[in-house]
Each structure stands twice: as C-alpha cells, then as structure tokens.
C-alpha cells in the first residue's frame, strides 16, 4: 500500500493530504516504463557486445573450425604445388631434355581460365573472397596436374621409342673377341689384295676360322640373305630402322632367312670366304640413311674401354684388306 503524503498549508495552518492527479500518475507511469525500456535495451545491447549466447558461442566455434580447416587445406594445396613443381622441374630439366623434347613453358603450366566467370555462383556471401580464392587455387592445381600427366604420357611414349632405338642401333661387334684371330682391316683407304691398288675399304674385316658364329649387331629385320650381290658372296643385310642397315659378307652359311625378325646378339650365320675374299673372314658394314659409315663408332655394346682402344688402334692401320 502506497504511503500517504501530506503538505503544510500555511493559510489554514494545518497539514493537508496530497492528492495525486490521475494525469500525473499516468505521466509518471509512462516515464517509468520508458526508462525501464531504455534500460532494458541498453542492457541487451551491452550484453550482446560483451556476453555471448550459447548459439553465438556455437557459431563462433564452428567458424573457428572452418578457418582452421581452410588453413590446413591451403597448406595441403601449398604442399601439392611444391611436389608438382619438383616433378615439373625434373620433367623439363631431365626427362624431356634426355628424350629431346621441348620443355613445357611455365606460362602453359600455370595458365588460368579465360571466358566466363567460373566463380559467379560463389559471389554475394560474407566469405565469398575466401571461397573464390580457394576454388581458383584448386582449379589451377588440377589443370597443372593434367598438363603434367599429359607430359608424362608423352615421355612414356618417347621412352618406349628411345628403348627401341637403342636396341636397334648396331652396337655390338658381330664376332666375339675370343673367336677372332685378329682384326685384319678397318674402315678407310687400304690396299686391295687382288689388284694391289690403294682404294677405299667401306667396312671392317674380322679374321676368324671358317664356321665361326656371326651375331646380329642390333634388333631388326633380315632384308637379304643371298649370294646375289657382286663381291659379297653369301651375305646378310639387316634393316634396323631409324635409317640403319648392317651387312655381313663372305659367309659360309646362313642361320636366318629373309623377312625374319632378329634381336641383338642372335646367331645369324657363320664366317666363310665366299665371293671376292682372300681368306676366311667377316666383312662387316654399317649404313646410315643409305650412306656407309665407320662401324668402329658403334661397338659400345660389348667391348670394354681397353678392348675398344685396341680395336681402334688396329682398325686405323693402313694395311691390306681381305676383300
């Protein structure tokens, strides 16, 4: 119950009861309600600034987790780029260089995407910039991986071709050292055994007993195994591809037939003295693009450095050939 208040009336010299007007009561009530509302609003505002609700705390935790995951994702993308750059460097500086392929320029490896805006659907959000940047990096990484994958596919094909090429080159001596009597004559000007005239000798003569095995110096296909070439007698020709052909002349007999595929080191015939020959020996020639070249440059497949040096010394002597 509200307290009754009085005031002193000087005219009547007595205390009179204070009568509160209804309008005044309503006014004070409104002021009170307004003050309470303002205080409540101020409290809520302050609370919202400094006091977190359970929902806000949950959202903040979720946002912090998303930011952490974004940092971890960026770190993984950085690591992926680092690994990819290492592969790209080896690809350009080793693999493509070894197989004589042009390096892929960095502009091609890191080219962006032109045309339409690929990231329009991510615009208009609070974290649009972050989302768009992440997607750009992932797209760039994916494209770089595709470019590198295609490069490695190309290298695989080049490696297969290179392996075939290295196997095809006539790279071994066609008669084993242990079967040789001596290396009779090399490539260059030599004295003809029949005319005694100095003329150019286009092959190498390996002196060995009749029946000594003769081996294919590289992979290829036998194109001839006959006695129909002047001076060569029974001879074999092998087409190795890539412009290389090897010839084995003055044979005693064949161990292959025309159109037969052979591998380096296969037994193809036996030393003889057929055709224009003074004694049992193998006359061996190598052709490149139809031109005879010095076979001494191709014996890296089965000779040591010392054996090759001795063979080179003997082959350089200007002596008499055997055919």
Image (cartoon, rainbow, N blue to C red):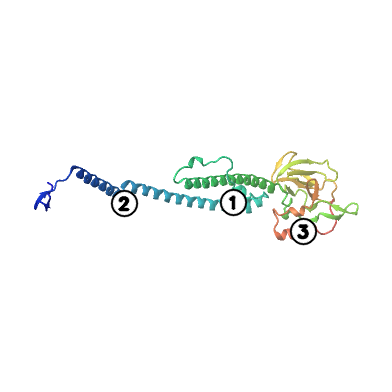
Contact (CB < 8 A) between labels 1 and 2?
no
Nearest to the observer: residue 242 or residue 250: 242
Question: At 78% across and 41% down in the image, what residue appears?
Answer: 224
Outermost residue toward the top in this view: 259
Residue 225 image offset from top left, x and y in percent? 77, 41
Q: Which residue is mark 3?
A: 312
Q: State the image quarter where residue 221 is shown.
A: top right
Residue 252 image offset from top left, x and y in percent? 78, 45
Q: Earlier in the sequence, mark 1 or mark 2?
A: 2
Callout 3: SS: helix
Q: Is residue 221 visible?
A: yes
Callout 1: SS: helix
Contact (CB < 8 A) between labels 2 and 3?
no
Q: State the image quarter where residue 177 is shown.
A: bottom right
- Camera-near label (1 vs 3) is 1
Contact (CB < 8 A) between labels 1 and 3?
no
Left or right placement of residue 266 versus residue 53 in this view? right
Disc 1 versus disc 3: distance between alpha carbons? 42 Å
Neighbourhood count class around disc 3 (C-alpha, 10 Å): few under 14, some 14–19, many 20 upward: some
Mark drawn on residue 46: 2
Q: Is residue 265 visible?
A: no
Q: Earlier in the sequence, mark 1 or mark 3?
A: 1
Nearest to the observer: residue 228 or residue 271: 228
- Camera-near label (1 vs 2) is 2
Nearest to the observer: residue 191 or residue 289: 289
Residue 299 image offset from top left, x and y in percent? 73, 54
Callout 2: SS: helix
Left or right placement of residue 269 versus residue 146 in this view? right
Left or right placement of residue 29 versus residue 158 in this view? left
Q: Which residue is mark 1?
A: 88
């Amino acid at each position: 119950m509200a307290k009754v208040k009085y005031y002193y009336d000087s005219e009547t010299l007595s205390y009179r009861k204070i009568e509160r007007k209804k309008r005044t009561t309503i006014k004070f009530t409104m002021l009170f309600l307004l003050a309470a509302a303002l205080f409540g609003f101020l409290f809520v505002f302050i609370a919202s600034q400094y006091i977190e609700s359970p929902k806000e705390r949950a959202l903040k935790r979720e946002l912090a987790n998303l930011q952490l995951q974004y940092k971890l994702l960026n770190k993984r993308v950085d690591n992926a780029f680092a690994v990819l750059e290492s592969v790209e460097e080896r690809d350009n500086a080793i693999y493509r260089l070894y197989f004589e392929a042009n390096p892929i320029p960095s502009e091609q490896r890191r080219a962006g995407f032109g045309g339409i805006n690929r990231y329009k659907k991510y615009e208009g959000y609070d974290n649009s910039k972050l989302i768009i940047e992440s997607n750009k990096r992932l797209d760039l990484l994916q494209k770089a991986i595709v470019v590198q994958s295609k490069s490695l596919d190309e290298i695989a094909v080049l490696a297969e071709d290179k392996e075939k090429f290295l196997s095809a080159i006539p790279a071994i001596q066609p008669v084993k050292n242990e079967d040789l009597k001596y290396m009779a004559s090399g490539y260059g000007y030599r004295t003809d055994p029949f005319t005694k005239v100095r003329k150019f000798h286009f092959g190498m003569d390996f002196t060995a007993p009749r029946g000594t095995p003769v081996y294919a110096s590289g992979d290829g296909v036998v194109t001839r195994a006959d006695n129909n070439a002047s001076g060569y007698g029974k001879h074999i020709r092998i087409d190795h591809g890539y412009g290389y052909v090897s010839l084995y002349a003055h044979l005693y007999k064949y161990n292959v037939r025309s159109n037969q595929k052979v591998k380096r080191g296969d037994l193809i015939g036996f030393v003889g003295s057929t055709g224009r020959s003074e004694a049992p020996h193998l006359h061996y020639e190598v052709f490149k693009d139809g031109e005879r070249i010095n076979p001494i440059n191709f014996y890296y497949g089965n000779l040591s450095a010392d054996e090759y040096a001795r063979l080179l010394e003997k082959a350089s002597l200007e002596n008499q050939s055997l055919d």
